[in-house]
Image (cartoon, rainbow, N blue to C red):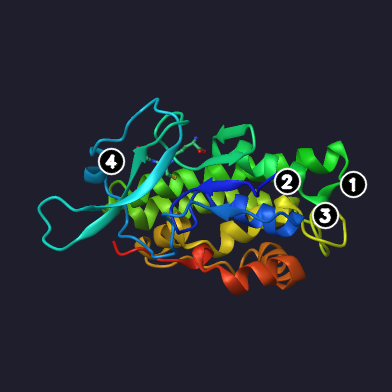
Amino acid sequence: MSNPMMIYFPFGGRGELSRLAAAAGGVELDESPENDGTVPDMPSRNQKKLPLPLAAPFAALVCCPSPGVAGANFVCVVAVPGSFFGALPTLKHGDVELCQSQAITMYLGEIGPKFAGLAAGHKGVDAMYTGILEDVLAGCAGVVFGDHSTAGEVVPAHLNKFFTVVEGMLPASGFINGLDFPTIADCAVLCMTDMMVPIGIAMQLAGGYDLTPFPKMLAISSATKASPEVAAYLAKSATLTAMPKM
Ligand SMILES: N[C@@H](CCC(=O)N[C@@H](CS)C(=O)NCC(=O)O)C(=O)O
């Protein structure tokens, strides 16, 4: 069977944990051919009003001229046969077609040879951290696409709420599931600390955010980045820290 193919923007967002899950688990993940790695301008609320075909089967990214902005382009979503709600990411692998980023992450983890021996408890922990990342990400996206003027209060309060609990949950040493390699849970923590879109952008809009009160999160992120599979992925992909033009 051919490699699974994910369609998503060439930045972190709701695609990065799936990329990391594939890399850490030993899965070759292809990305849509339209995604040539060029970091687009930040999708804006205006762009969302462009014809995003809902309920059309499989979506694709295309570069469209930006209305009213001479010479500017942005990436928008158009439908091609096979899609769901007009939102990304989507994944196709043989007969399997998925939307919903968390489902895509868990599926890629499930087929990863490196994760073949994981117990139900490990997978439950991985799913939990996948959901925590979505909560962190959604709150940050609300600020990035919303009212920037309150970012200085809203972003630290939001991140503190989650990061304080995550820090308390993490082991004093080693990876989260106690194995000698990182799993999806560790990759989710890496996204929390290092991913630019939308978490890092929200931190910047807040005037910065100090991660030093969360040393266990930082240690997990460093160890995950240093693991051979993730290090090889990060050497060839810049999406984790890619910064679109705002
Ligand atoms: N719950 C969905 C949310 C998907 C979603 O909102 N994706 C955004 C990008 S991160 C998108 O495609 N937005 C375009 C739109 O909704 O019009 C998931 O986790 O995949």
The answer to whether marks 2 and 4 mark residues whose Cβ atoms lie closer than 8 Å is no
Mark 3–mark 1 Cα distance, whole angstroms, equals: 8 Å
Near mark 4 (Cα within 10 A), the count class, few <14, some 14-19 or many ≥20, is few
Q: Which tag, 2 or 3, sits closer to the chain's start?
A: 2
Near mark 3 (Cα within 10 A), the count class, few <14, some 14-19 or many ≥20, is some
Q: Quadrant of the N terminus?
A: top right
Say whether mark 4 is within 8 Å of ligand 1. Answer: yes
How far across and how far down the image is residue 121, in percent? 84, 39
User: Which residue position holds label 1?
Assistant: 117
Establish if 126 lies above or below 29.
above
How far across and how far down the image is residue 122, in percent? 82, 44
Establish if 100 lies above or below 19.
above
Q: Quadrant of the C terminus?
A: bottom left
The answer to whether marks 2 and 3 mark residues whose Cβ atoms lie closer than 8 Å is no
Query: Which of 128/59 is in front?
Result: 59
- In the picture, measured across the screen, residue 40 lies left or right of residue 172, that is left
Q: Furthest residue to the top? A: 55
User: Which residue position holds label 3?
Assistant: 114
Residue type, mark 1 in image: Gly
Mark 1–mark 4 Cα distance, whole angstroms, equals: 42 Å
What numbered label is drawn on residue 48?
Answer: 4
Q: Quadrant of ligand 1?
A: top left
Near mark 1 (Cα within 10 A), the count class, few <14, some 14-19 or many ≥20, is few
Say whether mark 1 is within 8 Å of ligand 1. Answer: no
Mark 2–mark 4 Cα distance, whole angstroms, equals: 30 Å
